Amino acid sequence: MEDTITTIYCLREDFLKATRHRDDSQVLMSTAEVMSVPLVAATFFGGNLDKTRLFLNEYGYMKNMLSKSRLNRHLHAIGLGLWQGLFALLAELFKQRNSQRTYAVGSLPVPACDNIRIRRCRLYPSEEHGQAFRGYIPSKRRYFYGLRVHLVVSGAGEPVEFALEAGSEADVTVLKGLGLDLPEGSTIFAEKGYTDYDYEDLLEEFGLHLKAEAQEELQATNAGVGGVPGQADSPVHRDGLWLADELVRQEDPRGPTERLRAEDRLLPAGLLYSVPLGSNSG
């Protein structure tokens, strides 16, 4: 645990130095320390930032720990460019060490509220957005209201590309919008929801092979690629990317009145550790 926490912090510190990021001389916690808190929370504390904050302070990892509210403000004041730059850097590393060139694509829901509270949702008022954020979870046979994160992960479950879209967006539509900057000859495994023969032919021209299969066939042929697709309790549902939570909060400048539930937030454990993919999991 100690080695992991140290690695998380050192990675952030080295990255910020390489990008010539400078903190104000009066800050109590550096940007590297603030960025490390949600990563440690995702890795060891199920995404609970307050427990992580107390642990890191009591055990001497971060002696100048901020209060809960100040840490929350500092965390969300960090520009998305830093998170995206770090993700891009690690994505290249994950692709370089993926010698088998096998990938999997899938999505997971991020409910903004329970279905019974849709009319009172302040993040995405139904009066303004209509049914755009109303999506469906096949594994649970139920609808949800919020966002859906679409991920492309390596065979070891390490994320290399992602997109954040409204819940009603079809998986295959979002896939077409991804850059898919993958090595030539790569194979992408997906569920049948990604079936589009014309798009598969187009990818073939660029040396990419998309294999969209039924969930049962995919589990049998691709159990070793990012875990078992469709697994409802997949770690990607529990951890995922905290970046999505930051995007949600930037879209809602009125503050933390409408927070995502802790178990539905996306935390950035996948930036450093392999994250098995649960396609269309709830």
Image: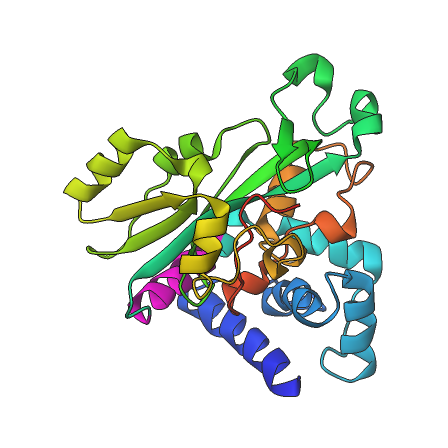
Q: Is residue 108 visible?
A: yes
**Residue farthest to the left, as pictured:** 205
Which residue is at the front of the view, 220 or 99? 220
Q: Quadrant of the N terminus?
A: bottom right
| Magenta region, residue range | 84-97
Name the residue nearer the viewer: 237 or 69.
237
| Relative image position of residue 172 (x, y in whole percent) | 41, 33
How has the structure been colored for display?
Answer: rainbow
Q: Is residue 270 above or below residue 251?
A: below
Please provide percent x and percent y for residue 176. 35, 34
| Residue 118 figure quarter | top right
Q: Is 89 in front, or is 265?
A: 265
Position of residue 69 relative to residue 145, above or below, is below
Give the image location of residue 156, x and y in percent.
44, 68
Report the residue at 62% width, 58% height from top. 234
Q: Is residue 253 magenta?
A: no
Closest to the observer: 157 or 32? 157
Q: Quadrant of the C terminus?
A: top right
The answer to whether 83 appears left or right of 109 in the picture is left
At x 41%, y 46%, the residue is 190
Q: At 78% across and 46% down in the image, what residue appears?
A: 261
- Tell me residue 263's x, y (percent): 75, 53
Name the main secondary structure of what is drawn in magenta. Answer: helix
* Quarter where residue 224 is shown: bottom left
